[in-house]
Image: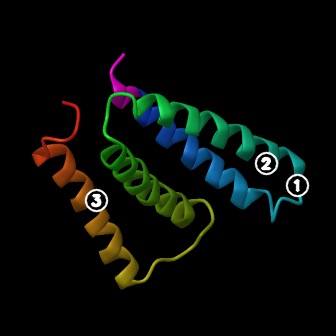
Amino acid sequence: MNPYVYLAAAIVLEVIATSLLKASDGMSRWAPTLGALVGYGLCFYLLSVTMKSIPTGIAYAIWSGVGIVLISLIGLTVFKQRLDAPALIGIGLICAGVLVINLFSRSSAH
């Protein structure tokens, strides 16, 4: 299977787990806490499978960059957290970095 499918699944699970971690209210609510732990476990497993084919730095840059953007959007829409202009500029730069890696780097698996 394409390693980017595993990477995409790892990103989705990380975003879900992080959202559940926020919902766990400092790990005082058991259901979201358990969901976060399971989500992170599966996420890291899939990330490790990804790293068999994609260099570690590239996989981690994409995983963390896309995860930051997605969790920021969830924070904005679900948790009603606002981002100021410097945060939005930083997120834009992260998006640009992920695009540069995927479009121009010879290190990523295409």
- Of 81 and 46, which appears nearest the observer? 46
Residue drawn at 43 percent across, 54 percent down = 64
Q: Which structural element holds mark 3?
A: helix
Image point 22% across, 61% down: which residue? 96
Left or right of 40? Residue 59 is left
Region in magenta: 1-5
> At 40% across and 78% down in the image, what residue appears?
87
> Is 77 in front, or is 21?
21
Report if the CB atoms under discs 1 and 2 are less than 8 Å apart.
Answer: yes
Which secondary structure lies at badge 1? loop
Tell me the CA gap for discs 1 and 2. 6 Å
Q: Position of residue 4 (x, y in %)?
A: 34, 31
Q: Secondary structure at mark 2?
A: helix
Instruction: Using the numbered discs, state the Cα–Cα distance from disc 3 to disc 2 in whole angstroms.
Output: 29 Å
Residue type for callout 3:
Cys
Quarter placement of the N terminus: top left
Of 11 and 49, the residue lying toward us: 49
Residue at image mark 3 = 95
Q: Amino acid at mark 2?
A: Pro
Residue 86 is situated, as x and y percent measured from the top left of the image, at: 36, 83
Q: Marks 1 and 3, how far apart in space?
A: 33 Å
Labels 3 and 2: the sequence-earlier one: 2
Q: Which residue is mark 2?
A: 32
